[in-house]
Image: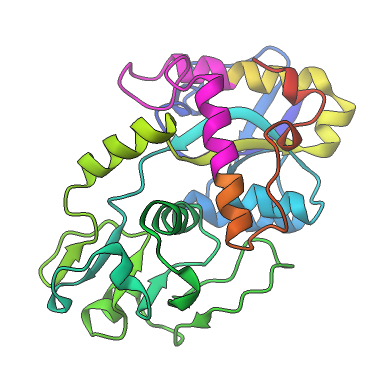
Amino acid sequence: MHLRTLLGDHPCTAALKNGSVKSDSITLDFTEYSPTNKGFKPMVRDGAFDVSEMAIVTYLMAKSFGKPMVLLPSVVVARFQHAYAVYRAELGNLKPRDLERKRVGIRSFTTTTGAWLRGILANDYGVDLDSIQWVTFEDAHVAEFQDTTLRAPQGKQIIQMLLDGELDAVLGEKVEREGLKALFPDAAAEEKSWFAQHRAVPINHMVVVSEALSRTNPNAVREVFRLLLAGAAAAPADARPAPPQFSAEEMSRSLALISRYAAQQQLVPRAFTVDELFDDLTRTLR
């Protein structure tokens, strides 16, 4: 059985893509997008793939609009987020609360890194997100979402706008360059403190399958999940996430937190429970 598949190049997917991990019953026919997130919109809007990497916030939003996708308990990208916030150095030494009433750029308001960072800013530092003028450059993957942010002029680049003074800060970009400062100068210390509080690594991308595949061919879905596990096991020992480094409990804590953040930011109408994110089949996969 051939399955249309979108997976980026990650330590946990390398063995699947180079063929060293394979199956006797299914073949993953890979489609390449660069960057991989360019393929999320076709998956959400057109069901372009049977198996697809997917930003977790995009999945939450897609689920809220009844898109026919099912989440697998397989994480392919997870990272701490504090290093992905920069501002113009000429503004002095800004603290998170100083972003209030500032112009803050972000690629799309619905990016997963953006949702994590806004959640951190609001819940850990008391930032009033509604006081910020959000400037975006792309629409949401989910077409039904009503984006009320200010759209940057056509052709403008996010970091250049920051350097030119058209933005005060940017979320979702990790840039070390003259004229810019990190919002969290000691990101490693912030991340350590955040992990001590939440006991989870922020999830960026997981894997979904089409609802039709899960409903009509559960054995194929089980085999997809087996391949994902085998690919993760074949990844270098220091590569995250790879079982058992990303435990089921840690995954659940991370999913519950990003679901709450997404609801707070009105990306979804309510926070989903972790169980709701899976179907009767994928909920049983381990």
Q: Quadrant of residue 4?
A: top right
Q: Quadrant of residue 107?
A: bottom left
- Residue at position x 73%, y 29% from top? 2
The image quadrant where one finds the N terminus is top right
Q: At which x and y percent is residue 32?
A: 53, 46
- Residue at position x 50%, y 82% from top? 151
Residue 106 horizontal side relative to residue 181, left or right = right
Q: Residue furthest front?
A: 126
> How many numbered dots are placed on residues in this image?
0
| 250 up-or-down from 159: above or below | above
Q: How is the image coloured?
A: rainbow
Asked if residue 134 can be seen in this view, the reply is no
Q: At which x and y percent is residue 11?
A: 39, 28
Depth check: give the residue in front, 168 or 107. Answer: 168
283 falls in the magenta region: no
240 falls in the magenta region: yes
Asked if residue 143 can be seen in this view, the reply is yes
Q: At which x and y percent is residue 38?
A: 54, 57
The image quadrant where one finds the C terminus is top right
Depth check: give the residue in front, 250 or 44. Answer: 250
- Residue at position x 71%, y 21% from top? 26
Q: Quadrant of residue 188?
A: top left
| 269 up-or-down from 213: above or below | below
Q: At which x and y percent is residue 187?
A: 23, 47
In magenta, the rendered stretch is 228-257
